[in-house]
Amino acid sequence: MEDWVWIAIGVAAALIVVLVVVRLATRSRRRHRSQELRDQFGTEYDRVVDRTGRDEGEEALRERVRQHDARALRDVTDEERDAALASWQSVQMTFVESPATAVRDGEHLVFEVLRERGYPLESIEDRAAAISVEEPELAGRYREAHAALVQAESDGAKDMTRLRDALLTYRTLLYRLVGAAETSGRLTTNGETDGQTISETTGPTDDVIPVERPTDQVRDNEDLTTRR
């Protein structure tokens, strides 16, 4: 076999090796980038990719990050933080008498803080997408809280558990947005808690929203008071 044939074979083999190495490296980089997005977005990654496919979904998530980095978000002032937390206490205390009203007011309060900080406000999905960059575990809960409110206002359904979860979601999100620590403890009848501070990254405990007492228990207590 002539020398030029061996040379051609060698060049072709070298090119094949290079192409294989490049392809493997590309796959490795892609897996690494995918894993970074999974780590950052958690369940939000699964939601987006399941709906649109991996390539389109990952690009959408990267676009969220680019928009977030380009957005001029500002921190709230101490005065704004104090005002928001004071407003929240009023919202929370209306839950027993009017759960849907409390949830609606909670959503509005979160909306106002998002507006003050410079988040997009066009739709619930725009807000959830923007939130997901820094608070990915709250994005889905934020959508669910809004859906619970819409249902309660449209058909008058009083799913106390769902509304209570919605209010807890708004509370957690509000505290994260204003950079405040949450407090843990059961509310008394006058709305006070034990005041124990918990981490900003820890979700609220399940017993921080006032729970409506059963009607029969209220009636029995009233009858006992009358007899006395």
Image: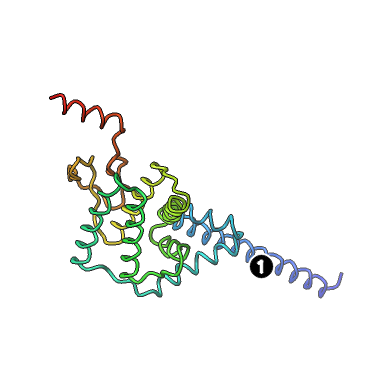
Which residue is under mark 1?
18
Residue 46 x/y as whole percent: 53, 53
- Residue at 17% x, 42% y is 194
Q: Amino acid at mark 1?
A: Val
Residue 15 x/y as whole percent: 71, 69
- Residue at 25% x, 49% y is 93
**Furthest residue in direction left, as rendered:** 228
In the picture, the quarter occupied by the N terminus is bottom right
Label 1 Cα neighbours within 10 Å, binned few <14 / some 14-19 / many ≥20: few
- Residue at 20% x, 45% y is 191
**Does 80 appear above or below 161?**
below
Between 88 and 99, the residue placed more toward the observer is 99
Residue 215 x/y as whole percent: 31, 33
- Residue at 70% x, 68% y is 14
On screen, residue 30 versus residue 113, left or right, reads right
Between 228 and 143, the residue placed more toward the observer is 228
**Furthest residue in direction right, as rendered:** 1
The secondary element bearing badge 1 is classed as helix
Residue 68 x/y as whole percent: 41, 70
Between 109 and 203, the residue placed more toward the observer is 109
Determine which quarter of the picture holds residue 131. bottom left
On screen, residue 12 versus residue 101, left or right, reads right
Query: Which colour style is shown?
Result: rainbow
